[in-house]
Image (cartoon, grey):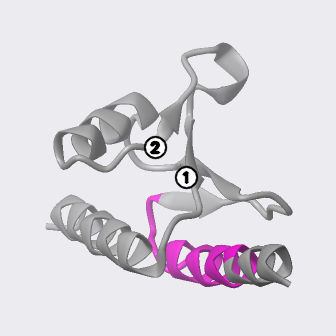
Amino acid sequence: EYLMANVASIIEGREKLLRDIATLDYLRPRESHGNFILCEVLDGNAKDLYNVLKKRRIFVRYFDVPPLRDFIRISIGKPDDMSILMEVLREIGDRKNE
């Protein structure tokens, strides 16, 4: 029962994050069935985005290999953490649109 509640929470968080990220012009989230979302960085450099997030103490994965260089991977976390992530991603998007 405990495990299934955690699985349901991760799925709910993943689906919400997919919808939220899809509203951003500079990221394209890929459908996922795991506990993470792979996002293509459309405007800018994935490594730069990774570093900006890291400076804000938001840790995502960046893979410096050719097929994944334009992507970041975001693990699904607690709802409060995902809200903070989206605030920062929106702020970054707003700065790009200025």
Contact, mark 2 vs mark 1 (Cβ under 8 Å): yes
Q: Using the image, tell me which numbered label, if any, was put on residue 60.
A: 2
- Image quadrant in which you'd find residue 36: bottom right
Give the residue at mark 1. Answer: 74
Task: Please state the horizontal and vertical placement of residue 71, each as a whole percent of the image.
Answer: 58, 39
Q: Is residue 16 magenta?
A: yes
Tell me if mark 1 has few (under 14), some (14-19) or many (20+) residues whose alpha carbon lies within 10 angstroms of its own. Answer: many
Between 96 and 54, the one nearer to me in the picture: 54
The residue under the point 25% across, 65% down is 88
Q: Which residues are magenta?
A: 10-26
Between 42 and 16, the residue placed more toward the observer is 16
Distance Cα–Cα, label 2 vs label 1: 5 Å
Looking at the rendered structure, the secondary structure element under dot 1 is strand
Q: Position of residue 72 (x, y in %)?
A: 54, 42
Image quarter of residue 59: top left
Q: Is residue 86 above or below residue 68?
A: below
From this view, report whether residue 37 is shown above or below residue 70: below
